[in-house]
Amino acid sequence: MDRTTIHGSVCGADGTAVGAATVTLISLQGRQLGRAVAEQDGSYAIDSPGAGSYVLIAAAQGQQPQASTVVVGDEPLTYDIALSGTSGLAGVVRGLADAHPVADAMVVVTDIRGEVLATGKTGMAGTFSFDELPAGTFTVAVNASGYRPVALPVEVGAAGITRIDVELRSGTFLQGTVRAGADRRPLNDARVTLLDAAGNVAGTATTREDGTYAFTDLDVGDYTLIASGYPPVATSMTVDSYDGEGHDVELGHPRQ
């Protein structure tokens, strides 16, 4: 069987030559038939066993691999290959108040359907990076101890690394114990309501058995704390003057 040459050039999405790209020819059954490395100008040439259908695979560092079906006849075949660059996302997480890098922050990338595409933690310099993300619009969520979580939309381009800066607002927490009675015993199941400076409810909590409560992820500022026991309960009844009847009263917080 006469061998037939397949030749052409390998270029990137912007049309520039991709030197040192590897071009591999395989049969439709997956058997490797030939291999070539593109020159600095992107040109390549590879011999096929002869007329027939084959799969041509091109790969290069920093580019998305591409597989194409080629049909070879009796004459040499010219086939140019265009590779798409890999997309990526990188950035740095800093504190909003002092601009210092935030280490060990959790970074999560999700697509428009909410599917998680990548997760990772920032390094000591507050940096993170994700390689080989598809192009598109994503949501980047970042959270770290001592900071309020943040989520922001990011548009990742078709090629190259998209870089972003993420600023985290410092968060704080409030905790304490509710006590009642002359002996100041911890009060279990008390309702604690936290109001911000504008009078809006910033959170509600119910004390535990030891009377403790906690609010997390709060903005720094002024708050009003309201603690209360069970709300009063009123019931109607008729008391018989001859029989001493019992009447149980059940207290509880209304369901929200």
Image (cartoon, rainbow, N blue to C red):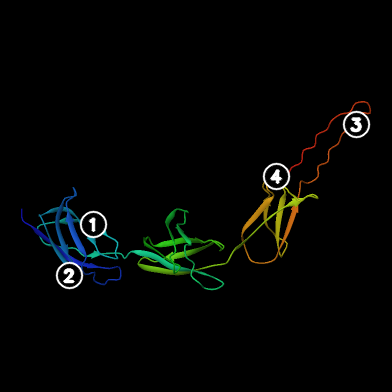
Q: Nearer the viewer, residue 98 or 196?
A: 98
Q: Earlier in the sequence, mark 3 or mark 4?
A: 3
Give residue 68's mark: 1
Q: Do the residues under discs 1 and 2 have CB atoms within 8 angstroms?
A: no
Q: Nearer the viewer, mark 4 or mark 1?
A: 4
Q: What is the distance, in whole Å, between disc 2 and disc 3 at their CAs?
A: 104 Å
Mark earlier in primary sequence (4, 2)? 2
Dot 4 surroundings within 10 Å: few (below 14), some, or many (20 or more)? Answer: few
Q: Earlier in the sequence, mark 4 or mark 1?
A: 1
Distance, label 4 to label 2, CA atoms, is: 73 Å
- Identified at 58% across, 66% down, the residue is 170
Front residue of 16/175: it is: 175
Mark 1 or mark 2, whichever is nearer to me: 2
Residue corresponding to mark 2: 39
Rendering coords of residue 56 (x, y %): 20, 57
Q: Which residue is at the far top?
A: 242
Report which residue position mark 4 lands on: 255
Q: Find the distance from the CA under tag 4 to the CA under tag 1.
A: 63 Å
Which label number is shown at residue 5? none
**Disc 3 vs disc 4: Cβ atoms closer than 8 Å?**
no
Few, some or many residues within 10 Å of mark 1 (<14, 14–19, 20+): few
Q: Which mark is residue 239?
A: 3
